[in-house]
Amino acid sequence: MSFNSFNSDTLMSKNDFASPIWLNNPSSDFDSSFQKVVEGSKLSKIIKPIKIGNVQLPNNLMLAPMAGVTDGSFRQLCARLGVGYTVSELASCKALQMRSSQTLDMIRFDGDTGKYAVQIFGSDPDLMAEAASYVESLKICDVIDLNMGCPVSKVVKTGAGSALMKTPELAAKIIKNVSKSVSLPVTCKFRIGWTENSINVKEFARAVVEAGVKAITVHARTRQAMYTGPAQWKYLEGLKDIAKNIPFISNGDISSEEHIIELYEKTGCDGFMIGRGCVGKPWIYAQLLGHSELLIPEFRFKIFKHHLVDMLMEHGSSAVPMFRVHLFGYLKNHPHSASLRRSLCTERNPNVVLKIGEEFFKNNGYL
Ligand SMILES: Cc1cc2nc3c(=O)[nH]c(=O)nc-3n(C[C@H](O)[C@H](O)[C@H](O)COP(=O)(O)O)c2cc1C
């Protein structure tokens, strides 16, 4: 189904349209109005525009790259809800070299996702440079991000992802080669270390900054912790001094105004990247930016509906299974969430999913 020709009325009733316009029509133009922080709101002194290289971001709230989650539809939705920067799911440099259509579909999108980085991973500096140059030639993104944090065995056993934290010289070589091969700014995202006993975030940050990255994002967990246990923000302290003139972005367990204030006070970071905190709650960005008008349940249902419709347009018949991770996030506070998860885990009919969302939000179930 083509993005522009889809008629959203097939899934949306005619009388429940209200502003903002994009909520009523998935193919409407990109609307950046939520990307501005509301003056006088709680975070108005902390949320501000920043630059990565020569790329100006409307604000310093960022959507974390998440494989299986941050497809084009979700990146667009979050950008419409105010996020200042989005990153693709990680794309293999080998798959890019082979021009894999699955990988290309993952990083390309017909809609508008605001300022956008394509994230690539690999451990061969030449292959990474070639992949980055190919991505640049597609003219689909503003920044190239290098993954140095992925903990998955299949990735680290090739020396890529978070395994690069054990080989800072190789990480630096990758950055240098990639930076030479593209004119877009090159950034990287890494963790605080490989194991709890080998935390080397400061040394690693020094190496990548010296190699010339234009921003660093640090996930405050080790590879050993994978995604569990609390993020260890204390290890983010002092990184701003190492980053000097380039943005230093904090990541890990950020999901409220209080978190942002605490992290800012502790680390002086330039940006805040939110991952799981926005799954099932994409309006968190609007909320943090002070746009409280979006918090009514009726709007939340419209956002849910818009999200599903966009995914149907992007992925066709596989959209409903792919939407499941979001669906379970949206229904997290449902009184019967466990039984719903069981009954919905094989559902493929978008109308059934839509109906469940409608009942949930219209009964104010979320609040
Ligand atoms: C399902 C999932 C997929 C992820 N995929 C990626 C990825 O492709 N690239 C990456 O750099 N990080 C990836 N991450 C890590 C997140 O970007 C982020 O660093 C991590 O979830 C910590 O942030 P959070 O506590 O706000 O979720 C992923 C995380 C999750 C939960």
Image: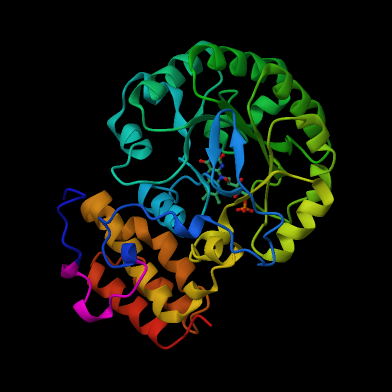
Residue at the bottom extreme? Answer: 363
Q: Residue 212 in the image: x percent, y percent?
A: 66, 19
Vertically, is 287 above or below 241? below
In this picture, which residue range is highlighted in magenta?
Answer: 9-20
- Looking at the picture, tell me which residue is in the foreground, 82 or 164: 82
* Residue 32 within the magenta-colored segment of the rendering: no
Give the left or right position of residue 311, taking residue 164 as reference.
left
Specify whether residue 121 is in view. yes
Q: How was the colour assigned to the protein in this rendering?
A: rainbow
Q: Residue at x 69, y 64 (%)?
A: 257
Residue 97 in picture, x, y percent from top left:
37, 19
Depth check: give the residue in front, 171 or 78: 78
The reply to whether residue 124 is visible in this rendering is no
* Residue at (73% x, 65% y) in the render: 258
Q: Residue 279 vs residue 205: left or right?
A: left
Residue name at image x 47 percent, y 80 percent: 296
User: For this view, does 2 lie left or right of residue 315?
Assistant: left
Residue 282 drawn at (x, y percent): 49, 62
